[in-house]
Image (spheres, helix red, strand yellow):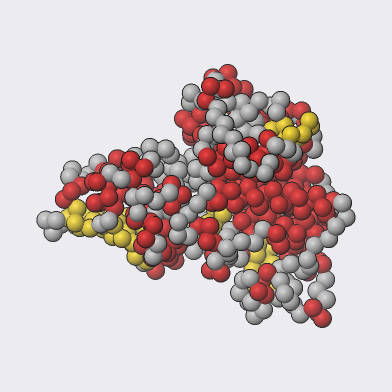
Amino acid sequence: MRNITVKVHPSKANLKKKDQLAWKIAEIASDKAKIDNDAVEMVINRIIDNASVAIASFNRKPVISAREMALAHLRKNGATVFGLSPKIKVDCEWAAWANGTAVRELDYHDTFLAADYSHPGDNIPPILSVAQQSKCNGIDLIRGILTGYEVQVNLVKGICLHEHKIDHIAHLGPSVAAGLGSLLKLKTETIYQSVQQALHTTISTRQSRKGEISSWKAFAPAHAGKLAIEAVDRCMRGEGAPSPIYEGEDSVIAYVLSGPKKKYVVPLPRINEPKKAILETYTKEHSAEYQSQALIDLARSLNRKIKNLSDIKKIIIETSHHTHYVIGTGANDPQKMDPKASRETLDHSIMYIFAVALEDGAWHHVKSYIPQRAKRKSTINLWRKISTREDRKWTKKYHDVDPKNKCFGGKVIIKMNNGSTISEEINVADAHPSGKKPFRREQYIEKFKSLTEGLISAKETKRFLNLAKNLRSLKSNDLIGLNIEMSSKFRRFKTNKGSIF
């Protein structure tokens, strides 16, 4: 690996392409690096993971809306839509829109946290849709996905967007563009322009994850993927982009991020070095914001130890800066304590999540969020006894540069009415690579079968899993099979007659 220093340069400096971050990203996207075997196995895991959460969210309103928009753009030799017959194909950018929304809706796929936040699995829907439409093979798809993960993970390590209230999809646009460059074997110059265009068009604020959180949280990464596809298409036609997008005098760093005096350091592999960043990422056992994963596991454990939850006087969660200020009471969002709040908002309330997991001793991607559950009197009483506070020890662990030491948990202090105190802590989620029960292929398949049970046939389950496991050897015509056809009796369509498409 090498560390790339990125800073603003005045226009008169005429910064050379080879010294720009976008060019260095394009160089690794267009190189001839060998494929790491462990990384390939993880690509397969994440394709399985994405498919499982996409099918589980098939009949949720945002997913229906995105799918109906996609179906207005049918294309004979296009890409497939999750849950529908492989005979139905749409333009690849619209397939990316529909499938990306389906993957993101339940907040249930993979994550990577460093200087900023990300869900690198968001790279897969747009890269897969272009692969299907462009008749690429399994190896091409693997290369594209590995590049997408590599770029997003390393941008997340080096550049914090959140402190400037910029949504994390600003790292996804460039990563998808780079991944498409690898997939399609594009020239370095074309990828360079594509990365810049994709970044320029995918900057938005974090209001999408603040206050009353709407369905846009699911649409946002799908939108970034769609815009990245369009950026690559334009650049393949010879169009250019705002340049240099990171280092320019009026660039993203200069006026959106930390300003002209700031120096960022972004790690990137050397040219022709295998891309293995996907191995640093981790998926979710529970359908909730990643910082809640470990605390759900701790709540499940505490459920077995506390006989009467009504005896609890108050609960304090000591945790990292991020957990406290984004999903804790430090956010100062009254919606996070509101029983009438949207699913998207409850997903970002550790107070609600911990209360339900402590009461039920479990967490479910549907049952834990239904309105009746949020309005249960005992839950509300417990929920309002919970507060969070930052502990610098946990913030330091959260930002540790060594993945083996990085922690996303916290310490829970439960004060009982009789004056006694129960105190326990957890570093990482059970499913984390360093956790009690790290996810292996077996767990990905188990999660897949659990989320798709009854929605797809046993025959379809076997067909898809066998195909995914043999990703390396898939021919161009085989990639269409990486879609899953859902049993027709479970499909629901709700057409909005007042829409444009």
Q: Quadrant of residue 480?
A: top right
Above or below residue 442? Residue 196 is: below
Above or below residue 310? Residue 265 is: below
Q: Residue at x 53, y 68 (%)?
A: 163
> Which percent across, then down, holds residue 369?
39, 42
Q: Quadrant of residue 188?
A: bottom right
Where's the C terminus, which quadrant? top right
> Which percent across, then down, holds residue 178?
73, 52
Q: Residue at x 48, y 54 (%)?
A: 213
> Which percent across, then down, holds residue 157?
59, 61
Q: Residue furthest right?
A: 238
Above or below residue 217? Residue 82 is: above
Q: Visible in this render: residue 268?
A: yes
Q: Is residue 281 left or right of residue 328?
A: right
Q: Residue at x 67, y 75 (%)?
A: 254
* Along the line of sight, the residue nearer the viewer: 232 or 403: 232
Q: Residue furthest top?
A: 459
Above or below residue 382? Residue 124 is: above
Where's the N terminus, which quadrant? bottom right
Q: Is residue 410 left or right of residue 108?
A: left
